[in-house]
């Protein structure tokens, strides 16, 4: 007997799933369940449209029907016996990690993706995972026991169409993690608009150094492990809880799939404009998450964030606030910088816990470390182990990562793309390079940063940069013309604020300018969530 997997908005049954508003699900059209009104007879379904054109019914959404592509929702289950697993869209950070973990657990794993290239392709192939370049129904000819569908995959994907035709069992990435990786363990979930990856990474390293042998699945490469995943034998698993949607058949946030033993909530701001309508929509998702935490389990929340403060009010779980305010259960005290280290003081319920040392830069990162110290304290980790792990934590790739130094010039890579992240990253790094200039190179390429939702906020993010280089968004044609972000306007606004700001139509012109402009002592800070045409190495080669 197959058991339907839980969705955030669906109650399971072995037959057709029942939505939490009482409707029965019939079948999937394009992506999502078509609802059959159960009571009263003849009731019309009315719902608001979400940003992706789907209609909302209660807490569950399904996209508007565009073509008949019937999909049996009862095939969204994981069989009791699984040997062969195929992952659609394998080369993303999360799906790649899952593929490797499944392979390490002894499963026969295959995968497919578009534009397969190193380093992920090499990494997966070295693991013995057979990769297919491009999506094709023939990739399922071996008839896998289970298909894991990545969240970037649409219902029109050829492999999804073939999966439906063959009637194969399928699941999302979080469902697979729950079943194969997190089962029997105590999940520690790190969520929030900012700081998830770094906070989760610090925690994983501290648990490891304390001898707790943790497992983890994180959205960045931990430099201490040179990996973004680990299969440990200990009782804890650290998971980065993403607010992005789960899959085309499950538009709820990924973090709603997990039942955390302990959780961290770092911040809540508007982001992911392709998924969320506005800040209120984002807050709804986080509210569902916080409301779902068991009363016996604990949430560490950054209380200085007004959105977080609203969300945690009157919730049933055990809540402890961390921050810099006097009423914080966990408080960040005095901070001093002695490059390459930051020293920071920690108070627990008003009593001084100690002074810790880390290579992490910036107040925001020290607050991330504070949250981890709070979690570690509840797990009984000694101050000695905490201190040693914080001091030896090497950081995360693409988070303030030094890519190279040449002729006295440093090139740093950072994932910052949200206006808050850009501002805090520049503010954090500036004190560590007092003898030179900070050249900020920014590529807006996320679904949010390529939209004009942050057009008037970005000019405030570069105040501490000496020279600002803004590239034209490389994928702007994907955004409706009326919604597009303007790099030219950002540069104009920055100049009006007295900044030395320049617009560049392409990466080559930035490289040429930076090569001629940079001098010994300068820091070139490159900020993008993408590869940015390998700009880091190309600049270093010219310096």
Image (tube, rainbow, N blue to C red):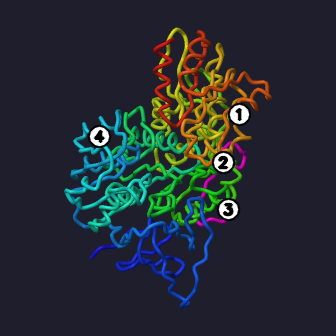
Q: Is residue 167 above or below residue 132?
A: below
Q: Which residue is mark 1?
A: 490
Q: Is residue 540 above or below residue 7?
A: above
The image quadrant that residue 93 belongs to is top left
The alpha-carbon separation of the residues under discs 4 and 3 comes to 44 Å
Picture residue at 22% right of the left edge, 53% below the top: 107
The alpha-carbon separation of the residues under discs 4 and 1 comes to 40 Å
Picture residue at 37% right of the left edge, 46% below the top: 214
The alpha-carbon separation of the residues under discs 3 and 1 comes to 37 Å
Q: Which residue is mark 2?
A: 483
- Determine crowd level at label 3: few under 14, some 14-19, many 20+ residues with C-alpha closer than 10 A: few
Mark 3 falls on what kind of element? Answer: loop
Q: Which residue is mark 3?
A: 313
Q: Position of residue 45 (x, y in %)?
A: 57, 79
Q: Answer whether residue 315 is magenta in the image.
A: yes
For marks 4 and 1 on the same chain, the one whose residue lies earlier in the sequence = 4
Q: Nearer the viewer, mark 2 or mark 3?
A: 2
């Amino acid at each position: 007997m197959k058991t339907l997997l839980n969705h955030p908005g669906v109650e399971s049954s072995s037959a057709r799933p029942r939505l939490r508003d009482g409707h029965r699900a019939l079948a999937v059209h394009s992506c999502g369940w078509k609802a059959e009104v159960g009571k009263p007879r003849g009731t019309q379904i009315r719902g608001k449209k979400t940003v992706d054109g789907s209609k909302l019914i209660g807490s569950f959404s399904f996209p508007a029907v565009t073509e008949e592509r019937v999909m049996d929702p009862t095939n969204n289950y994981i069989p009791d016996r699984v040997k062969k697993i195929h992952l659609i869209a394998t080369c993303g950070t999360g799906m790649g990690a899952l593929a490797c973990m499944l392979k390490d657990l002894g499963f026969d794993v295959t995968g497919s993706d578009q534009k397969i290239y190193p380093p992920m392709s090499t990494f997966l192939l070295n693991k013995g995972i057979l990769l297919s370049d491009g999506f094709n129904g023939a990739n399922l000819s071996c008839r896998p026991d289970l298909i894991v569908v990545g969240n970037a995959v649409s219902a029109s994907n050829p492999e999804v169409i073939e999966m439906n035709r063959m009637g194969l069992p399928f699941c999302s990435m979080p469902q697979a993690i729950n079943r194969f990786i997190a089962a029997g363990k105590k999940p520690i979930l790190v969520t929030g608009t900012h700081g998830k990856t770094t906070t989760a990474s610090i925690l994983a390293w501290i648990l490891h150094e304390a001898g707790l042998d943790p497992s983890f699945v994180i959205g960045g490469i931990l430099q201490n492990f040179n990996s973004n995943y680990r299969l440990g034998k200990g009782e804890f698993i650290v998971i980065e809880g993403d607010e992005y949607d789960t899959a085309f058949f499950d538009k709820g946030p990924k973090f709603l799939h997990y039942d955390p033993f302990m959780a961290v909530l770092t911040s809540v701001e508007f982001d992911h404009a392709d998924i969320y309508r506005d800040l209120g929509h984002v807050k709804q998702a986080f509210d569902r998450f916080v409301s779902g935490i068991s009363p016996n389990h604990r949430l560490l929340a950054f209380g200085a964030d007004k959105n977080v403060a609203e969300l945690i009010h009157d919730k049933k779980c055990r809540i402890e606030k961390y921050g810099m305010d006097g009423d914080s259960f966990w408080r960040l005290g005095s901070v001093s910088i002695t490059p390459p280290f930051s020293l920071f003081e920690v108070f627990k319920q008003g009593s001084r816990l100690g002074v810790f040392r880390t290579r992490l830069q910036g107040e925001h990162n020290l607050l991330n470390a504070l949250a981890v110290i709070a979690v570690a304290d509840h797990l009984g980790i000694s101050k000695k182990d905490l201190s040693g792990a914080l001091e030896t934590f090497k950081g995360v790739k693409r988070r303030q990562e030094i890519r190279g130094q040449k002729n006295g010039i440093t090139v740093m890579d950072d994932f910052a793309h949200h206006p808050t992240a850009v501002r805090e990253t520049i503010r954090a790094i500036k004190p560590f390079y007092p003898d030179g200039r900070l050249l900020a190179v920014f590529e807006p390429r996320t679904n949010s940063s390529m939209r004009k939702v942050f057009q008037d906020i970005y000019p405030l993010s570069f105040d501490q940069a000496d020279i600002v280089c803004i590239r034209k968004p490389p994928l702007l044609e994907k955004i409706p013309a009326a919604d597009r972000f303007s790099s030219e306007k950002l540069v104009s606004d920055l100049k009006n604020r007295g900044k030395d700001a320049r617009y560049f139509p392409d990466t080559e012109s930035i490289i040429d300018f930076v090569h001629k402009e940079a001098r010994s002592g300068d820091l070139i800070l490159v900020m993008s969530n993408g590869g940015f045409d390998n700009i880091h190495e190309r600049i270093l080669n010219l310096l």
